[in-house]
Image (cartoon, rainbow, N blue to C red):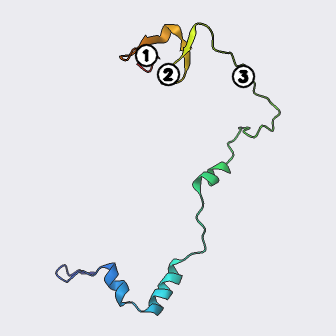
Amino acid sequence: MATDYDAPRRSEADDLAEDSLEELKARRNETQSGVVDVDESETAENFELPGADLSGLSGEDLTVKVVPKQADEFTCPRCFLVVHRSRMVVDDDGNYICRDCE
């Protein structure tokens, strides 16, 4: 189809201004669909991984032994990890931080 590039352009607002009320109602009914938008995160939750028992139905209990902070460890004020004192350095402000945050 040939396009006349010299012709004045019509915007969508011009088209809507000229349409009758009946045409607008018909166009509105055509564009609406019965499909409901589905949240992708909800859809992903319904998938089950093969061989994975994420629901805890297998009867296995996961136990983790929590050890309190030892005397030779400190908590980094930037990353809040508990690390050994051998990983401690002093930053420019004189604060003790871990080497990873340096």
In the drawing, what numbered circle is on residue 95?
1
Foreground residue among 74 and 39: 74
> Residue placed at 45% from the left, 19% from the top?
100
| x and y, in percent, of residue 4 in the image | 20, 82
Badge 3 element: loop
Q: What amino acid type is highlighted by mark number 1?
A: Asn
Quadrant in the picture for the N terminus:
bottom left
Asked if 82 appears above or below 44 in the picture, the reply is: above
Residue under numbered circle 2: 77
> Quick check: 59 left or right of 76?
right
Asked if 80 appears above or below 31 in the picture, the reply is: above
Label 3: how many Cα within 10 Å (few below 14, some 14–19, many 20+): few
> Quick check: 46 left or right of 79?
right
Q: Quadrant of residue 9?
A: bottom left
Residue under numbered circle 3: 64
Q: How far apart are the two marked residues, 3 and 2, measured between alpha carbons?
A: 25 Å
Foreground residue among 3 and 34: 34
Verify CB contact (< 8 Å) between mark 1 and mark 2: yes
In the drawing, what numbered circle is on residue 16?
none
